[in-house]
Amino acid sequence: MTYPVFAVTVDLVVLTVREGGLHVLLVRRGIEPHLGAWALPGGFVLEDEDLPTAARRELAEETGLAGAGGHLEQLASYGAPDRDPRGRVVTVAYLALLPDLPVPTAGTDAAEAEWRPVGKLGLAFDHDRILADGVERARSKLEYTPLAAAFCPPEFTIAALRQVYEAVWGESLDPRNFHRKATSTPGFVSPTGGSTEGGAGRPARLYRRGDATLLNPPLLRRRPGE
Amino acid sequence: MTYPVFAVTVDLVVLTVREGGLHVLLVRRGIEPHLGAWALPGGFVLEDEDLPTAARRELAEETGLAGAGGHLEQLASYGAPDRDPRGRVVTVAYLALLPDLPVPTAGTDAAEAEWRPVGKLGLAFDHDRILADGVERARSKLEYTPLAAAFCPPEFTIAALRQVYEAVWGESLDPRNFHRKATSTPGFVSPTGGSTEGGAGRPARLYRRGDATLLNPPLLRRRPGE
DNA sequence: CGAATAGTGTCTGTGAGACAATATGTG
DNA sequence: CACATATTGTCTCACAGACACTATTCG
C-alpha cells in the first residue's frame, strides 16, 4: 500500500510594532505560482532539517536577523489539497515577534520585502488566513504571557511596553494603571537601574524582560460585546 | 531545483474523563515500526484530503464515533528528521475531547485499543511528547472556553461539569463556588428545564452547553508556585 | 427523621479601572 | 516657571474563595 507524497514548507508570520501599529513582514514573490503577489516569507523544509530549524533558517534568510531578542513559536499547519497548484503542499506556519528593525533585506526567492500594517491584504495562497490566525494568536498571548517584551529592544520603558499592547490590541490603556500592573506582576519586567534621558518630561526607568513564562494574574483585554 | 519528499500523517490525542481521571485513547500497533507498542491513533493523509477531514476520518475509524457532541481541534505538528525510521514523516496532531463512551473498536492498523490514564506511558515515536502537549492544551482551554462540556453527554449536571474540571486539572474545587460561577458566566451553560432523578439527595437541574466560545471572565486554575 | 446532594447567601481579600496628586525632567 | 511625561496614591466595584445556611430528595 502506498501513500501520497507531499512537499512541506514553513511560512512565517513576522510581526512587529512600528508607528503605533502592528505590522507584518511580506515579500513579493519572485517565482511562480503567484509571481508578483505579496506573500508571507517562507520556503521548503530541507532534507534532515527539523521544523523549528527550518523556521529559524527562513527567518534569518528573509530578515537577516537571527531572532535578536524576539520570539518564535509554531502557529498551525495548513494543507488543503488545492492550496498550491504545484501539488500537495503542507505548510507549517510559525509566528515571530520582533522589535522594530530596519527594512529587511530581500531573500533569494523574494524580489522585495517590506513591513505592512496588518489587515485585509490579498496575499498569495491561503496566507490571509494564516496571517489572521497569527495576529489572533499574538493578541491572546499578550494577555497571558510576558511576550509583549519580544516586540521591544532589550531595554525598554513601561510606556514603550504599553504602546505595544495598544498597537496589538488596537485600544488605548490607562498609563497609570498599566504602569502599576506591569511593575507589580511578578516576573513580567525587572528594572535595569538605568533611565531614559533627553526626552520631554520626567525620565523613565528602564526595564528588561522578566523570567516569568506566564503572567499571573493575566492582563485581560476588554472583550467587545460579551 | 528539487525538494525533499514527505509523508504526512494525522495523529489524534483523544481524551475523555472516566473514573474521576483524564484518560487517553491508545492503540497497539499492528505494523512496523514499533510493532506491538502503544501509540496514539492516526494514519496517513490521503490524496485530495484536507487535514481536518483526515483527522475526522481517523477519529471515526478508530473510535467508531463521529464526534458525538465532542470537540476536535488542531494541536501542533511534529517533523523531526528521525521521528520515523521509514523516512521523512510530518505528523499534524489533533486534539479530541469526547464524553465517556464504551470501549472503542480497533481500527484497521491497530490490533487493540483502550483508554489509559494519562501520564508517562512510553509510547511509540514521539507520542509521549504529543500527548503531553495535548493534555496541557486541554488544561488551558478549560480555563478560557466552555469546552469542559465536550467531555459531558449532551445534557449534564453542574456537578458532572465540575468533576470534569477536577479530573483534568487534578485538583478539587468548591462545589458551591463552582456552581455559582458556572451558572453566572454568560453563555457557559443553559438550563434544559429537566432534572436528574433516582439518585441520593436533591435532584440536580440539567444543563446543556451554552453558546459562548470564550468564557468571560475566565475560570482560572490555581497556579502552583508562581 | 437522618443522610446526602443541590443550590443560595454572606463576608472578606485582591485586583481592575477611574482619576487625583506628586515627582522630575526640558525649554 | 510652564509643560510634558513618569510614578504613586486613593476610591470603588466586581469577583474569587471560604463557608454558613436552606432546599429537596431517598431510605
Image (cartoon, coloured by chain):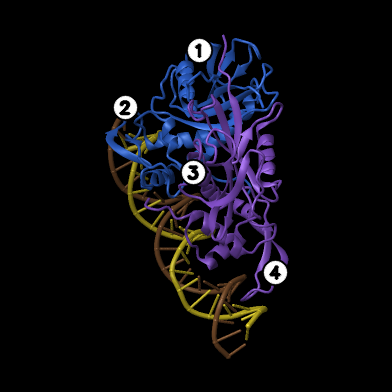
Chain colours: A purple, B blue, C yellow, D brown
Q: Which residue is mark 3?
A: A132
Mark 1: give few (<14), some (14-19) or many (20+) Cα within 10 Å. Answer: some
The reply to the same-chain question for discs 1 and 2 is yes
Give how far apart the Cα atoms at labels 1 and 2 are: 35 Å
Which amino acid type is shown beneath numbered disc 4? Ser
Q: Which tag is nearer the camera, tag 4 or tag 1?
A: 4
Q: Check if mark 4 and mark 1 are on a common chain.
A: no
Q: Position of residue B139 (x, y in %)?
A: 53, 37
Q: Earlier in the sequence, mark 4 or mark 3?
A: 3
Quarter holding residue A46: top right
| Element class at badge 2 | loop
Q: Mark 3 falls on what kind of element? A: helix
**Measured along the vertical axis of the image, is residue B218 above or below residue B109?**
below
- Residue at the location (51% across, 10% down)? B108
Q: Are marks 1 and 3 on the same chain?
A: no
- Which amino acid type corresponds to the residue marked 3 in the rendered image? Ala
Q: Which label sits in the foreground, 4 or 2?
A: 4
Above or below, B62 against A148 in this view is above
Query: Is disc 4 surrounded by few (<14), some (14 to 19) or many (20+) residues within 10 Å?
Result: some
Q: Which label lies toward us, 3 or 2?
A: 3
Q: What residue sits right under mark 2 in the picture?
A: B198
The residue under label 2 is which amino acid type?
Gly
Query: Could you tell me which quadrant the N terminus of chain A lies in?
Result: top right
How crowded pointer 3 is (Cα within 10 Å; few <14, some 14-19, many 20+) is rated as some
Around disc 2, counting alpha carbons within 10 Å, would you say few (fewer than 14), some (14 to 19), or many (20 or more)? Answer: few
**How far separated are the C-alphas under marks 4 and 3?**
37 Å
Q: CA distance from mark 4 to mark 1?
A: 65 Å
For label 1, the residue is B106
Helix, strand or loop under label 1: loop
Above or below, comparing residue A200 to residue B55 in the picture: below
